[in-house]
Image (tube, rainbow, N blue to C red):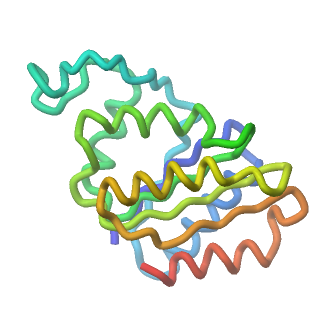
Amino acid sequence: MNIVILQASPRANGSTAWMAQEYKNAAEAAGHQVTLINVSHKKIAGCLACEYCHTKGNGACIQKDDMQQLYPVLAEAEVLVLAAPIYYFTLCAQIQAPIQRMYCVNKPAKVQKMALLMSSYSPGVYNGAMAEYHDICNYWSVTDTGIVTAKNDEQKTDGIRAKIAALVSNL
């Protein structure tokens, strides 16, 4: 399967980046093609709600920023993995921008499955992000292959690595 991971942590060696890399490693070992994109290093503006994409743009966004690099990659994705740190009870701004900008295509055409990876310093802060993720899966009519969370004392452990490998086995 063609898998795209949108990794949203600005910390290159942080827990979320580690989780995304572990998913990539497990998926490649299982024979999947994986593209890992650190969206926190991209310049992606929020949706303008201008409706250009649904009127004159024929599905293309009027904004010409780094999101233009993601659209062709997302168009070929069969599995979309969101990897985001949780700073304050919801998906971070770095992952929100590309999610919001998918509005112009409604959903990446070939995506059939999704997964969510999240890390945080604190336990019990994931409900808002999980609700948004489940809403996206339902709206897009895609299969939720699972969620892995890692609070501070769980990060970068063999237990989390095993949970991530289990997500890949759900493909």
Name the residue at the right extreme. 153
Using the rendered view, name the quadrant where residue 153 is placed.
bottom right
Indicate whether 39 appears above or below 17.
Answer: above
Residue at horizontal 23 percent and vertical 40 percent from the top? 105
Residue at horizontal 33 percent and vertical 53 percent from the top? 139
43 left or right of 55 in image: right
Rendering coords of residue 168 (x, y %): 51, 77
Indicate whether 109 appears above or below 147.
Answer: above
Indicate whether 99 appears above or below 146.
Answer: above
Front-lying residue, 44 or 129: 129
68 left or right of 145 in image: left
Residue at horizontal 69 percent and vertical 80 percent from the top? 162
Front-lying residue, 130 or 48: 130
Rendering coords of residue 163 (x, y %): 67, 77
121 left or right of 133 in image: right
Count of numbered tags: 0
Rendering coords of residue 12 (x, y %): 71, 43
Front-lying residue, 140 or 156: 140
Residue at horizontal 10 percent and vertical 22 percent from the top? 55
Indicate whether 76 appears above or below 27.
Answer: above
Using the rendered view, name the quadrant where residue 60 is placed.
top left
Rendering coords of residue 96 (x, y %): 51, 36
Using the rendered view, name the quadrant where residue 10 is placed.
top right
Pick the quarter of the image with the N terminus: bottom left
11 left or right of 59 in image: right
Pick the quarter of the image with the C terminus: bottom left
